[in-house]
Amino acid sequence: MQRLSGLDASFLYLETSSQLLHVCALMTLDGSAMPGGYSFPEFKRRLAERVAVIPAFRRKLHNPLWNLHHPVWVEDEDFDLDNHVHRVGLPSPGDDRELAELCAHIAGQQLDRTRPLWQFYVIEGLADGQLAVLLKMHHASVDGVGGASLIGYLAGLEPDAPLPELPEGERHNNGLPTRVRLLRESAESLMQRPREIAGLLPELIGLAPRWLGRTLRGKGMPVPFTAPRTSLNGTITGHRSVAFAQLDLDVVKQIKNAFGVTVNDVVLALVSGALRRFLLDRGELPAEPLVATVPVSVHERSERDFGSNRVSAFFASLPTHLSDPAARVFFLAETNRRAKEHHYDIDADMLADWAQFSPATVFGLGVRAYSALRLAERHPVVHNLIISNVPGPPVPLYLLGARITGIYPLGPVFHGAGLNVTVLSYDGTVGVGLLGAKELAKDLWPLADALPEALEELSKAAPV
């Protein structure tokens, strides 16, 4: 038995049929690299071998009425791989747009909480003879870094890679806990909460004036509820739209070196340029910067040894209002520096510590009322979109024997922010996955097509 952290459990509590909180990874594959060539039975057999040694794929939620704390992970004694692996054929012509439409349909379906929270879709019929895989996992079980690690466990450096060796703490799941144990642990946790809150309050009280002071002086990150409103900011449904693009990582690094900035600065400048063109074409480019929420991994800074999600986030200004691409880079370099310094004022574990007190019932009722009353359209915009930048493997990988030719991560959207842009580097490429709420962004391909153009624009503007 392993109890979910408060932050992990929050992704369960905040999920509804419209606000779906799973993450996906679309991987395009070259099946000819498999010894003997691709066949679905062999592909599935290889997956079964790895799932058998990776407990994260065989654990499910356990949350009986007598559990007064967050749910726990337990081994699924009735685990059946057929419930998780699906074989799908693309309709002709099997191009990128057909693939994206299928992925959007899959991304719009909730995971079954009575089973391990993942699905694996093998997609055949691509126009170039390749195949694709869409891996879907609930955010309660992985964050960006954790998802990349799980892909690494399924893949290898060679087509005949051996089975993965997991860290000691990830090798076993214990059996179903007794009712007495759950009641005892729940009661002990509830009794400790007043003391835990008292221990966290001094840090929060000391942080508040310092953190707000930087914001009011304009020396920190953007203030929430000050973002300009666009058509991307409203109430969402469970319908999704998807698009993706692949860029050259060497070009991104050349731009980074030419401007003397970070890779993340270049990524945000790239997305800003593409968004500027996208919003101009829609006739709704705001006169002020957009505001993006940028998740940040705290795996290296965290002192906690539990929970799948070890993340924080900061707000970033996106200079979509600037026409000069070089000016956008310099703008981001300065504002990101201030935002990161502002963000680092907060302890890496503060979000996780306070999330331990997440109330399931209150969160669930609150999200449903927020959606039903369409409150996202009635108050100032908190943020316009979410942008994640996840480091991936720098070398080619073979997923169950097939060479991975591209990885495109797809993150969730929320009420009030109907677009997620997630970037992952892999083997000299940058995969950009775009996922939107379909009613707010029906067609994301103009944004995907604008990304290579924005990269070329930045490259031409880079100092020699």
Image: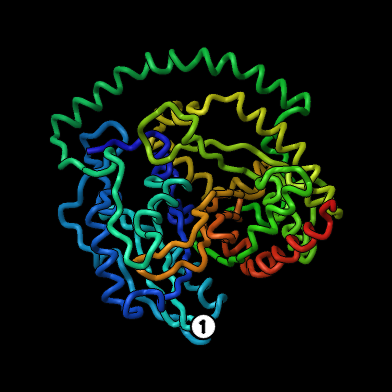
Does 294 sit left or right of 81 as displayed?
Answer: right
Counting the numbered discs, the total is 1
Q: Residue at x 69, y 43 (%)?
A: 262
Does 141 sit left or right of 115 as displayed?
Answer: right
Task: Give the answer, above or below, for where 418 lies relative to 96.
Answer: above
Q: Position of residue 158 (x, y in %)?
A: 38, 64
Q: Position of residue 124 (x, y in %)?
A: 41, 79
Tell me if residue 284 can be seen. Answer: no
Say few, some or many: other residues with alpha carbon within 10 Å of mark 1 (under 14 / 14 to 19 / 20 or more): few
Q: Residue at x 65, y 44 (%)?
A: 383
Camera-nearest residue between 353 and 266? 266
Camera-nearest residue between 417 and 307? 307
Camera-nearest residue between 261 and 111? 261
Q: Residue at x 48, y 62 (%)?
A: 396
Q: Quadrant of residue 156?
A: bottom left
Q: Position of residue 13 (x, y in %)?
A: 40, 42
Colour scheme of this structure image? Answer: rainbow
